[in-house]
Amino acid sequence: MENYQVYEGEFVAGAATFGIVVGRFNSFITENLLKGALDTLKRHGVPHANISIVWVPGAYEIPLATQRLASSHRYAALIALGAVIRGSTPHFEYVAGECAKGIAQVSLQYQLPVAFGVLTVDSIEQAVERSGTKAGNKGSDAALSALEMVNLLQKLPTAQ
Ligand code: INI
């Protein structure tokens, strides 16, 4: 890779501050996503004082709280955690879709990493698998991507 400029983030937190927005709906799942995210941040040296946790009613409310945190300019990255489980209701499509779209908008609007740790699954079993059992913990994965993106953005060139 000689002569290329290659940019890649490392899992280095430094003094970075993190905001976590977590949906209370399906809290038996989201509490485990939160545990995973906190554990990962802690293992990478982020002190408790550098982490804010915001609970919202459900995934639909995550974008607004995320936007508020982003507009405070106090955080190096945000982590969105939630569990949208399809079940038998068409509600799923609206909640999951608006949540994902809103989070992406906030991230681009504020040029801020907002990690997407919102499960969108067909069943409770799948949600359990992805929140700390056999398919890992998507809260931990989201925290890792937040750490990586914070570090990457510190390295990437900005407009002069
Ligand atoms: N919220 C979730 O976080 N997960 C879900 O699975 C869910 N379902 O299925 O309805 C859900 N609904 C609530 C929604 O996020 C809002 O809190 C509610 O509609 C009030 O605005």
Image (cartoon, grey):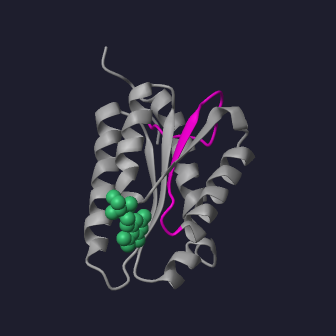
In this rendering, the answer to whether 144 lies above or below 156 is: below
The percent position of residue 118, horizontal first and vertical second, equals: 45, 61
* Residue furthest to the front: 57
Q: Residue at x 30, y 38 (%)?
A: 108
Write the start and end of the magenta stretch as one range.
Answer: 5-26
- The kind of secondary structure the magenta stretch mainly shows is loop
Left or right of residue 99: residue 33: right
Q: Nearer the viewer, residue 159 or 143?
A: 143
The percent position of residue 134, horizontal first and vertical second, equals: 63, 79
Look at the image and tell me whether residue 94 can be seen: yes
Look at the image and tell me whether residue 149 can be seen: no
The percent position of residue 17, horizontal first and vertical second, equals: 59, 32
Q: Residue at x 53, y 54 (%)?
A: 142
70 drawn magenta: no
Q: Quadrant of residue 97?
A: bottom left
Q: Nearer the viewer, residue 7 or 65?
A: 65
The percent position of residue 60, horizontal first and vertical second, equals: 35, 57
Quadrant of the rendering where the C terminus is positioned: top left
Q: Quadrant of residue 96?
A: bottom left
Left or right of residue 39: residue 61: left
